[in-house]
Image: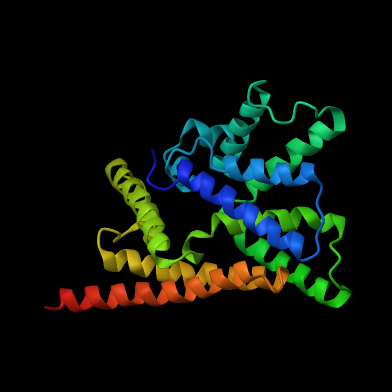
C-alpha cells in the first residue's frame, strides 16, 4: 500500500464527503438519491489505482499514463478510467438500472467530480465558490440547478482536504503519511535525474515536515475552509474543522520551534 493514497484515505474521503453532504442538505439543498450516490461513488473511487506519486512525476518520467491522457490531469483521468471499469463489471455495478440519458448523466457527473480533485483546479474552484456564496447571500438560500455540480465538487474537494481539519492525533498521522509518500517520490526523482518539487525537499526531519504543513495550512487550507464556511452557513462540522486547523497550525509551529532549539544545542 501507498503510505497516503490507499484504502484508508479513500474511506476517509468517502466518510467526510457524506458528512459534508449532510451539512449541505441541512442548509437547504435537496439532492435526489441518485445524485447523492454519484457523489459517494466518486468519493470512494477518487484515487482508485493511485501509484503513489504526483501528476508531475508521471509527466516528467514519461509514463504510459501521461502519454495516454496527454499530460492533462493524468492521475485523475486514470482514476476515472478505473472507476468506470469497476462499474462495467456486473458484480460491482451499482447503477444497473441506469440506461440511455440517465447512464450518460451518471458517468458525466462522476467523471467531473473525480477530475475536480486535481489540485490544479483549486484556486479557480475557490473563486467560483466564493461567488456562489455571495449570490446566496443576495438571493437567499436557493441553489440554482446549474450550480449543483459546483457545490458537489466543493464537497468532494473539501473531503479530500479534510485531514488537517481533524484533531491533532489524526492530523499529524496523515501529515506523516503524505510526507512519507512525497519523500519516496523525491528519492526516485533524484535517482532518475528528474526535477524535485521544492515542497518535497527536506522532509527527513520533523522541522521540515512541520514547515510543509504550516505552509499548506496558511496558503491552501485556511482560505479554502473560509469559503466552505460561507457556503455552508452555521455548520458546526465546518466550524470545528476550522478550529482544528488553527490548533494544528500552532502544534506544527511548536514542533518546528522545538526542533530548532534542539539543533542549536
- Give the vertical position of 89 relative to 106 (above or below): above
- The answer to whether 203 is drawn above or below residue 230 in the figure is above
Q: Quadrant of residue 232?
A: bottom right
264 with respect to 81 (left or right)? left
Q: What residue is shown at x 74% (from left), y 30% (from top)?
A: 95
Based on the displayed image, in which of its 4 quarters is residue 46 positioned? top right
117 sits to left or right of 168: right
In the rendered picture of this protein, how many numbered marks are placed on residues? 0
- The percent position of residue 243, horizontal first and vertical second, equals 52, 75
Q: Is residue 71 visible?
A: no
User: In the displayed image of the protein, which residue is found farthest to the left?
Assistant: 265
Q: Position of residue 259 (x, y in %)?
A: 23, 73
Can you say whether 243 is above or below 62 in the image?
below
Q: Nearer the viewer, residue 194 or 182?
A: 182
The residue at 80%/60% (across/down) is 29
* Image: 185 above or below 122: above
Amino acid at each position: 500500500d501507498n503510505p497516503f493514497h490507499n484504502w484508508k484515505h479513500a474511506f476517509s474521503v468517502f466518510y467526510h464527503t457524506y458528512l459534508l453532504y449532510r451539512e449541505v442538505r441541512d442548509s437547504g439543498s435537496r439532492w435526489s438519491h441518485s445524485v447523492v450516490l454519484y457523489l459517494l461513488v466518486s468519493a470512494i473511487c477518487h484515487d482508485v489505482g493511485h501509484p503513489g506519486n504526483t501528476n508531475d512525476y508521471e509527466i516528467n518520467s514519461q509514463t504510459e499514463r501521461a502519454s495516454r491522457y496527454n499530460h492533462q490531469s493524468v492521475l485523475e483521468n486514470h482514476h476515472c478510467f478505473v472507476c468506470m471499469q469497476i462499474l462495467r463489471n456486473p458484480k460491482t455495478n451499482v447503477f444497473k438500472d441506469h440506461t440511455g440519458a440517465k447512464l450518460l448523466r451518471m458517468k458525466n457527473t462522476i467523471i467531473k467530480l473525480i477530475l475536480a480533485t486535481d489540485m490544479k483546479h483549486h484556486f479557480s474552484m475557490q473563486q467560483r465558490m466564493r461567488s456562489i456564496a455571495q449570490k446566496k447571500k443576495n438571493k437567499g438560500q436557493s441553489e440554482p440547478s446549474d450550480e449543483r455540480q459546483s457545490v458537489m465538487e466543493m464537497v468532494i474537494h473539501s473531503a479530500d482536504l479534510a485531514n488537517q481539519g481533524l484533531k491533532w492525533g489524526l492530523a499529524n498521522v496523515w501529515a506523516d503519511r503524505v510526507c512519507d509518500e512525497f519523500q519516496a517520490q523525491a528519492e526516485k526523482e533524484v535517482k532518475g535525474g528528474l526535477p524535485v518539487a521544492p515542497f518535497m525537499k527536506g522532509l527527513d526531519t520533523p522541522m521540515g515536515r512541520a514547515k510543509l504543513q504550516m505552509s499548506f495550512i496558511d496558503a491552501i487550507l485556511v482560505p479554502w475552509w473560509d469559503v466552505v464556511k460561507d457556503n455552508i452557513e452555521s455548520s458546526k462540522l465546518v466550524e470545528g474543522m476550522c478550529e482544528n486547523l488553527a490548533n494544528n497550525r500552532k502544534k506544527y509551529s511548536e514542533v518546528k520551534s522545538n526542533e530548532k532549539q534542539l539543533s542549536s544545542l
